[in-house]
Amino acid sequence: MTDIETLSRQAIQLLQQLIAIPSFSRDEERTADAIEQFLIGKGVQIHRKLNNVWAFNKHFDPEKPTILLNSHHDTVKPNPGYTRDPFEAKIEDGKLYGLGSNDAGGCLVSLISVFLHFYERENLKYNFCIAATAEEEISGLNGIELILPELGKLDFAVVGEPTGMQLAIAEKGLMVLDCIARGKAGHAAREEGENAIYKAMKDIEWFRAYHFPKESELFGPVKMSVTIINAGSQHNVVPAECNFTVDVRVTDAYSNDEVLEIIRQHVISEVRPRSVRLKPSKIDKNHAIVQAGLSLGRTTYGSPTTSDQALLDIPSLKVGPGESARSHTADEFVYVDEIKQGIDIYLKMLESIN
């Protein structure tokens, strides 16, 4: 066990090291190397697959439940508004600047420090698995989804994303639908053909106006938005096909498959989901980890942003230092004190259930 000051200091040093290494999604090998070497240096036996690094507590007991501590080490690319070097991990006025500092470096190093705090302890009620994963920013196939079969049975997860250490107990899912309305080509000057645009218009109006019967307590209704449309080749030809795209934000009131089935029952267009992987998630307010957070004065809310929670089939709580509004912004930063507070709150929550 290590005191908060020491844990915070080593977390900040690790974060500075990670910020200095470009780690765009699908190109995170060097940050995975750094995390691997850091954990090995602390005497931890690690596992690695591609750019994902994970480990279990020293006295792992397969008879006990296991808590997953997860965050990601990939980043988006810096936006053009940066006035600083995005890879210069400088601390000024209590702020640690750099790409990925807030999303989600501060969360990741805090959870690693928490894992190290518990690593050598015996007689825990729970096992711990720390997983520093890749490709979160692109919901890639070679991130957490790749290694889940190798982590064994997991009972619940703490997913590190910047929430101001408030408790995101639910998260919207996402489906992108490619829809095809089909008609029959003909000459626009004559009464021939079936205009695919008119058929698409009927379905688009349905997407605009339809209200799903069930609503989420946290998010309200499922939201559907038609965002792209394309049809036609020249002015005098009735188009035989009209393609449009629908962005669907699924709440915890439905599964992605349920929403997809309802849509297909109501529209005449062919509906092709690009993926149903990014599922809505929810954890019961009465779950021990949520109650532990509430006892510390934390508040619960529903998160509109998507994270690796969407790929987990176990209860998960999204919580971490930093603020979601800073993610992907120019001159991204996290307060040093946020990391210290994050470690402290994580520890108190996990100690209370152990």
Image (cartoon, rainbow, N blue to C red):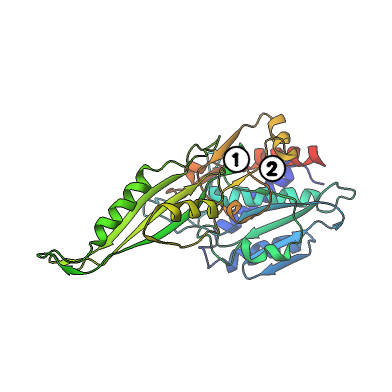
Q: Hey, what amino acid is under mark 1?
A: Ala
**How many other residues sit within 10 Å of disc 1, few (<14), some (14-19) or many (≥20)?**
many
Measuring from the top left, give residue 275's x and y in whole percent: 50, 61
Q: Residues within 10 Å of mark 2 (few under 14, many from 20)?
A: many
**Circle 2 or circle 1, nearest the eye:** 1
In this view of the protein, can residue 22 be seen by the observer?
no
Position of 282 relative to 27 (above/below):
above
In this rendered view, identify the residue nearer to me: 88 or 351: 351
The picture quadrant where one finds residue 348 is: top right
Please state which of residues 240 and 294 is positioned toward the viewer in this rendering: 240
Inter-mark Cα distance, 2 to 1:
17 Å
- Three-letter code, disc 2: Ile
Disc 2 marks which residue?
343
Of residues 76 and 225, the one nearer the viewer is: 225
Residue placed most toward the observer, 221 or 10: 221
SS for dot 2: helix
Q: Is residue 93 visible?
A: yes
Q: Residue at x 73, y 35 (%)?
A: 292
Task: In the rendered structure, find residue 168 and report the number of the disc placed on it.
Answer: 1
